[in-house]
Each structure stands twice: as C-alpha cells, then as structure tokens.
Image (cartoon, rainbow, N blue to C red):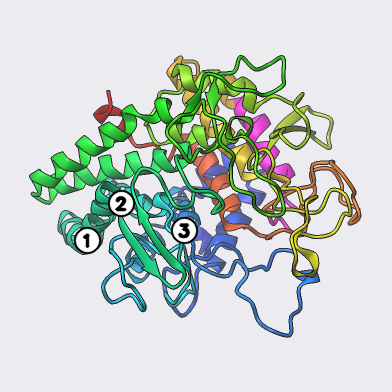
Amino acid sequence: YLASLEPLSTLTNSTADNGKLLYTSAMVLKAQEDKTHAGALIASLSNPWGETVSAKTGSTGYKAVWVRDFYQVAMAFMAMGDTRTAKTAFEYLEKVQVTDNTPGNGGDTGWFLQKTHVDGELEWVGVQLDQTAMPIMLAWKLHQAGVLSDQELTDWYGKMLKPAADFLVDGGLAKILWNDTQITPPATQQERWEEQNGFSPSTTAAVVAGLVTAADIAKKAGDTKNAERYLATAKTYNSEIESTMFTTQGNLKSENSDGEYFIRIGQDKDPNSSTTLNANNGREGFDKKQILDGGFLELVRYGVRDALAPSIVKTLPEYDDETLVDNLQVRYTFNFADGSGSFPGYRRYGNDGYGEDEVTGNNYAEGGNNTPGQRGRVWPFFTGERGHYEIAAANATNSLDAMKQQAIKDTYVKGMEAFANEGMMLPEQVWDGVGNNKAGYQLGEGTNSATPLAWTHAEYIKLLRSVSDKHVWDHYPVVEDALK
C-alpha cells in the first residue's frame, strides 16, 4: 500500500524524522477505513478514557463517522496520493445525508447527520453546518484533481451537493429523534466541538467556502440560477463575519489584549454583548467575549480571509497569550526533548471541560458524571493548524523562502512529531501540566483521550504536503477569487 503512494517519497523531505511518522500515519488512516462499508472513515479506533468505562456493554466511542473528521482524512488521502480511497469516501457520504428516506425524519433534507455508525445508521442527530459544507468542498477538490469527471460532478450535484447547498442557503427544520429545531444559516445548531449553538468563525468559514464551491459546481452543471444564488448568499454571509463574530470590546484581563479579537462563538449577532455561553462538560458558561479558540484560522485556510486581514492579525496576540489565567489560556509552550527549541500547543478553547479533572486528577466523566474541575487539554492538531497559517502568512508577504520553510518544519512539523507516542500514534489530547496529575503524564504526553485520532494524523500529512507544495493544501483559490 505504501509503495502505491507516490507523493510519500517527496513528502519525506518535509519531515523532521525522515518519514517515520508520515509512513505510520498513512497506514493508520487506511486502517481506520471500515472493511465492510468501503469509504467509511471513522474518527478513531478507540474509546477515549476507556479504562474507566465498563466494557460489559459495547459502546461506539469514536468508532463512527463524523463528516468533519471524515473530510480531514479524505483530504489527507488526496495529499498522500490515494485518490481511489478519497473518491470512494466521497461516494460513501450519500449514506449519511438526510433525505426523505432517513429513518424517523420529519423535517427538511440536505444536511448531513452529526454522527453515524459505519453502515450509515444514525446515532447523534445535531446539525453542524460545517459538516454540510465540507462534502461540497471535497467534491470541488476531487474534480479539480481529475478524480471526479465533469459528468460525475454533474451527477453528484443533482443527487447530493445541490440539496446540501440549498440547506446552507435556506436552512430548514431538523426533526429526527430528540432534535426539533429550525436552522437559520449561518447560525449553526452545533459548531465543530458539538457543544454550542450560534455564530462560529470556523463553521462560517466552511459554510462560505461550501457555497462558493457549490456555485462553481452549479455553473459547471448548467444551473446558472442557483450558481448565482449560492454565490450571492456566500457574499452576504462573508460580509457579516466581523460584525457578528469580532469583538471590539473584549474583556480579557491581559496586558497583551487590545480588546479586539474573534470570539469562539456567540448566540446573538452582537459580538460586543455580554451574553453567556451554554454550560457544558461540567463547566459553567462564561461571557462569550472571554472565550478564545483557533477557529478564526479556518477563515484563512479556506480562502475566506487573507492571512494578513486586520481581524485575523488582531486576534493572534490573544490566541497566543500565555499570561491569561489557566482556565482561559489556549496556547502552551513545549520544549523539544533534544534541546533544539520549543513549539506551541493549543487547547480547543478557553474554559474547555473535555478532559481530566484538574482538582481530582480523575479521567473525563469518570463514574459516568461530569465534574466542575474537568479541563480540556492541548490537542496536537492545532499545532498543524497554526503551521498552515504560518505558510499562508509567509505567502502573503512573499517570504516563504527556504529559511522560512525550514523554520516551519523545525517548529510545527517537528512539534507534531514530538506529540506522537512510542508506537507513533498521535493522540487527541496531550498533558498540559495544569492541575492534579494523578495519571503521572509527562508534559506533552498523550492522555487517555482518543488515540490514534484520525484528524491529528490527517493534519500532519496535510501539513507536510503544504510545506512541500509551498501553499496550503486545503486552500480554495475559487473562494479567494470570488470574495475579492
């Protein structure tokens, strides 16, 4: 299998470990495609913190399909030269799109199920608009690469992509099982961490990119009317990003903050209001202006914002601020074991409760209940996301020379490699050094969270491809051009 992946030999030159983690990651991702249902790419073969969960009754854990994680992995297959699996995966997505035939559906169609078993059976039914946009984005990439023919693209537009794009424009009623909610894009019922509703920079980045690529696909399919509709809607959503998600009256207590930055998410359209986010994972809700995350970088990755856009640049100091109180701090610095320097790691967001309890040291939800001291730790794939931003920023200033490439490799590529365990598995989370270390983790060591996490291995492969190509692998030039 590895010998069939032509780009690997070239990508090895962009690694800091002579390809060791690259080749392992390729096998890890292929191993996590279901063997009965071709193209079903799961999030992880593991149950996070499974050591404290009874095995008497089986549980899905991460052995399921989330379209967002799925997209990351499919793009990694493309990056490493396995276009066959990427295409098969795209074709699989038809199984997990909501249609009139979806069991129990009493609402509108076109969106993609939150989480399903590999055979397509639904399990969780929240609406995550990035998961509705990403199949469209993937189709566009597959067509650009010649993996989907013009006719195949047109066929899939009618069957799957048009209903998805229509939902991103019109929204609709989600009514399956417990869910009975009216969705009005670009506000999402759940953002990429499945914990909050509202206006999210990362979700909106995907929605705008999804609609621009949908417009391009519709045009190729001869549907001029909808091509114009999708593009016009994308431009409208795009024009409202800062006015709904960029605060100019931030209240973080830090000398590094000027009060102007992207918030993680907000339930209303005023980024300066003091509304409180929902409580989750044992943590009480905070004023939305206090919660930072790296979701704004997705705006750059997909081409919705230039890397040097004022709103992006203004948010970086807060995102990188290591003087914030631990509960709100997102970035943490780690040192390489060989003494060659340091590299950054990032939590999902401030006040994250998806991790070990910092007071007791217990695993997440040990005993079946959430606790107020639970703390989400550093996720290694954010080191890759930041590396991608650095590539985009260097290109924006025409400074991506050999020296800058080497610096990105020595910091972000090598940093992700440092997070791998002895078996070369990349974890979901690593120990950040905060609180009761009951398990005895070393700083930067993977916790008992999901390992291997497919998304982390995929991000590593994509970062290598981006460094090698000297531009961001999952960037969408058509989005950048359309929004100028």
Q: Is residue 266 left or right of residue 216?
A: right
The magenta-colored residue range is: 406-425
**What's the amino acid at mark 1?**
Trp
Give percent across and percent down for residue 343: 72, 31
**What's the amino acid at mark 3?**
Phe
Quadrant of the image containing the C terminus: top left
In this view, 333 is above or below 192: above
Q: Nearer the viewer, residue 432 or 239?
A: 239
Give percent across and percent down for residue 367: 80, 69
The kind of secondary structure element at disc 2 is helix
Local crowd at mark 2 within 10 Å, few (<14), some, or many (≥20)?
many
Q: Nearer the viewer, residue 448 or 352?
A: 352
**What's the amino acid at mark 2?**
Ile
The residue under the point 87% across, 51% down is 441
Residue 415 location, quadrant? top right
Residue annotated with mark 1? 156
Q: Nearer the viewer, residue 442 or 257?
A: 257
Mark 1 or mark 2: which comes first in sequence?
A: 2
Prevailing SS of the magenta stretch: helix
Residue annotated with mark 3? 70
Question: Residue 420 bears which disc, if any?
Answer: none
Question: Residue 136 bears which disc, if any?
Answer: 2
